[in-house]
Amino acid sequence: MTKRTIPHAAELHGWRKSSYSGGDGGSCVEVLDNHPSGIPVRDSKTPQGPALLFPAGPWSSFITSLRNGDLP
């Protein structure tokens, strides 16, 4: 079975705020690039974790859909 979470996301370094998060300085989604197992995603309100881990292919498709305005 594929691991889909990272229990202690704060142990990883290099998180960045998603460009799709609001600019008001409040809560946001953070992603981590170049993780060997996929794309970790966490809520900035709980940086200690857990983080969700998405396979790179489906994550890329999701981001493409966002950019194209294909999602409601």
Image (tube, rainbow, N blue to C red):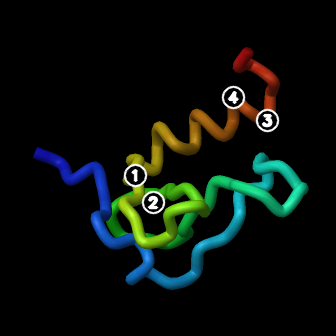
User: Which residue position is annotated with label 4?
Assistant: 65
Determine the secondary structure under disc 1. Answer: strand
Q: Residue at x 28, y 49 (%)?
A: 4
Which of label 4 and label 2 is nearer to you?
Answer: 2
**Kind of element beneath mark 4:** helix
69 vs 9: above or below: above
- State how far apart marks 4 and 3 are (Cα): 5 Å
Task: Kindly identify the residue that appears in the image at 50 percent across and 63 percent down.
Answer: 46
Nearer the camera: disc 4 or disc 1: 1
Q: What amino acid type should be assigned to the residue bearing mark 4?
A: Ser
Image side of residue 64 versus residue 57, left or right: right
Badge 3 or badge 1: first in the primary sequence: 1
Marks 4 and 1, how far apart at CA: 19 Å
Which residue is label 1 attached to? Answer: 52
- Which quadrant of the figure contains the N terminus? top left
Residue 17 figure quarter: bottom right
Q: Against 34, is 67 above or below?
A: above
The residue at 67%/70% (across/down) is 16
Going by the numbered disc 1, the residue's amino acid type is: Leu
Q: Position of residue 2 (x, y in %)?
A: 18, 48
**Dots 2, 1 in contact, CB < 8 A:** yes
Badge 3 crowding class, 10 Å Cα cut-off, few under 14, some 14 to 19, many 20 or more, is few
* Residue 67 circle label: 3
Decide if residue 59 is on the left or right side of residue 70. left
